[in-house]
Amino acid sequence: MIIGELAARSGVSPRLLRYYEEQGLLTATRAPNGYRQYDESAVEIARTVRMMFQMGFPQEKVRSLLACASPSASAADHEAARARVAEMRDDVDRQMTELARTREVLTEFLGR
């Protein structure tokens, strides 16, 4: 699929898709006319990368997770990816706890 179709299917702008490719987070081949060509897996990869960036994860963490979760990765790499995802989930849990505390403080302040 070309970049416009990937953008429509993934909900990620063509500009961001080009950026992800420049950063090595998304791969594309080139058609003879120079257009980028993406396979079906690019839809989920683009969505995942966007979500991880929106959640505040640094690029290196995103990159390492994608490398470990690749279909060509070894079983040990897949296990490492699962461990990284568990760490990320724990980070999100900590952030949610901190946000809940912050919300309570703000609510108390408004009640004064």
Image (tube, grey):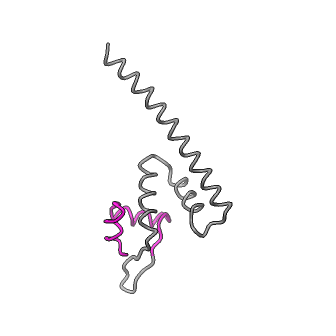
Instruction: Tell me: residue 73, above or below residue 56.
Output: below
Give coordinates of residue 2: x percent, y percent.
Answer: 35, 75
Q: Is residue 17 left or right of residue 69?
A: left
Q: Residue at x 41, y 55 (%)?
A: 50
Residue lying at the far top in this picture: please name it: 112
Q: Residue at x 56, y 50 (%)?
A: 85
Question: Looking at the figure, which quarter contains the N terminus?
Answer: bottom left
Residue lying at the far bottom in this picture: please name it: 32
Instruction: Tell me: residue 106, above or below residue 88.
Output: above
Residue 93 part of the magenta-drawn span: no
Residue 22 part of the magenta-drawn span: yes
Instruction: Tell me: residue 93, above or below residue 75.
Output: above
Give coordinates of residue 66: x percent, y percent.
Answer: 54, 60
Q: What's the magenta bit mostly, secondary-structure-wise?
A: helix
- Point out the stretch of residues depicted in magenta: 1-28
Q: Residue at x 39, y 27 (%)?
A: 103
Give coordinates of residue 33: x percent, y percent.
Answer: 36, 85
Q: Is residue 90 left or right of residue 107?
A: right
Quarter of the view holding residue 76: bottom right
